[in-house]
Amino acid sequence: MLKMFPIVSSHRLWWGGLQRRICLNQPVLSRQCFQHMHIRVGDRAELSRAFTQKDVVAFSELTGDVNPLHLNEDFAKDTKFGKTIIHGVLINGLISAVLGTKMPGPGCVFLSQEIKFPAPLYVGEMVVASAEVKRLKRGIAVIAVSCLVRESEKTVMEGLVQVMVPEAPKP
């Protein structure tokens, strides 16, 4: 049986430094329940995708990021990359998809991230986005993430994210 208890108002929210205080008398699952999370340290998930120029244009239109490095071949050919590159945040979106659809899955909440982009991703390259649970504590998972180009084994994104893990599905 799940035990629940209210926590009194605190005025500190998660988002400012991952404070573990929940506000406004919301019911919170006791520690006992977190032993029943549906993920464990070492769990892994991945997905693959190749972005098209149409994807890049759509992302640029949605976000307003019209940097010619992503959209204009004539501009990009004179840069160190030699051609247009995929937006880093679009690559990072693959990690969000892995976390939100595969592991931990629906209901997880992205809390923080620390990522690097050591190499560019070009249109048409097949990239594998992967995630592996490194630590679990009180409903928060620390997950190592990376995006690797399958053919060349080039890493285009890597880092750590923290997510709030959803409750285990009820049987």
Image (cartoon, helix red, strand yellow):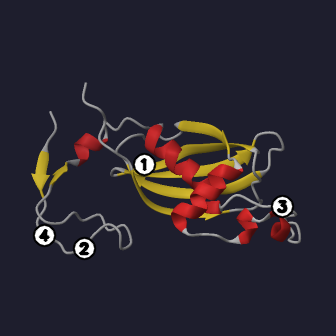
Inter-mark Cα distance, 2 to 3: 46 Å
Q: Nearer the viewer, residue 19 or 73?
A: 73
Which residue is labeled 4 in the image? 9
Looking at the image, is 17 positioned above or below residue 136? below
Which residue is labeled 2 in the image? 12
Question: Local crowd at mark 1 within 10 Å, few (<14), some, or many (≥20)?
Answer: some
Question: Local crowd at mark 3 within 10 Å, few (<14), some, or many (≥20)?
Answer: some
Inter-mark Cα distance, 3 to 4: 53 Å
Question: Local crowd at mark 4 within 10 Å, few (<14), some, or many (≥20)?
Answer: few
- The amino acid type found where label 3 is placed reads Lys
**Residue 8 is drawn in which quadrant?**
bottom left
Is 64 placed left or right of 147 in the picture? left
Identity of the residue drawn at 72% across and 55% down: 156
Looking at the image, is 47 positioned above or below residue 121? above
Mark 3 or mark 4: which is in front? Answer: 3
Q: Is residue 39 visible?
A: yes
- In the picture, which quadrant includes the C terminus? top left
- Dot 1 falls on a residue whose secondary structure is strand
- The amino acid type found where label 2 is placed reads Arg
Which residue is labeled 1 in the image? 136
Q: Nearer the viewer, residue 76 or 16?
A: 76
User: How far across and how far down the image is residue 124, in percent?
Assistant: 76, 45
Inter-mark Cα distance, 2 to 1: 22 Å
